[in-house]
Image: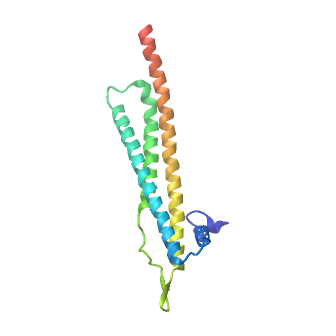
Amino acid sequence: MCEKIAFFGSERGAEIIKKVEALDGTTAKDVLNRLYGILTILDAKANGLLRVNSFFITMLVFFIGWSNTGTFPDALRDYVYIAYFDVLLLVISSVLCLVVVSVSWKFLRYATPDKATYKFDEEIGHLANAVDDRTHFYFIAWWLTLIVFVLSVGSAFAPIRRLGAQFIRYLFV
């Protein structure tokens, strides 16, 4: 059981190898192509999530900056701390996305010579581990961004209701 634990298990990428090898007519080249294809997909998804994170960080930084001016409504003061917490979560999410998109290995570095050809088993194992690790990093980053979205949207509605009620009271009282 511990061999498949995320980030540390020695067999954490073994499952994907078995799935890819189970496909009809696979060779080491096919397996490598599929693993690199999966890494490309993860790279694209992490790039997209980085863009979403940067949009949220920009909005939150403007909100935090506004909170340091004299025109900031007192009704929103309680939400400044949530904004700081959201920025922290988004920075962590962005760092995880950067880990996903980084290239930290030499391509086919672990292909070992075997008579007139090469053995790719070790290379496939390392790539499968990279796919597994980066999938987990992306999963964590995605959830952090979702948490920020829920906190931001949830926080946004309460002060709007409160400000709206104050405005209506001001108009009619």
User: Is 70 left or right of 25, judged from the image as shown?
Assistant: left
Q: In which quadrant of the rendered image does the C terminus lie?
A: top left
**Furthest residue to the top?**
173
The colour scheme applied to this rendered structure is rainbow
Is 150 positioned to the left or the right of 106 in the image? right
Report which quarter residue 121 is drawn in: bottom right
Q: Residue at x 47, y 91 (%)?
A: 116
> In the image, residue 17 lies at what x, y percent?
58, 71
Q: Is residue 158 above or below residue 129?
A: above
In the picture, the quarter occupied by the N terminus is bottom right
Residue 132, given in percent of the width and then of the height, sits at: 54, 64
The residue lying furthest to the right in this view is 1
Across and down, in percent, residue 144 comes to 50, 48
Vertical position of residue 54 compared to residue 131: above or below: above
Query: Residue at 43% across / 57% down in the picture?
Result: 44
Closer to the camera, 61 or 119? 119
Q: Residue at x 45, y 20 (%)?
A: 164
Which of 128 and 144 lies nearest the eye of the viewer?
A: 128
Q: Count the marks.
A: 0
Pick the residue in front: 91 or 53. 53
Dividing the picture into quadrants, the one containing residue 59 is: top left
Residue 123 on image: x %, y %: 50, 76
In this view, the residue farthest toward the front is 25
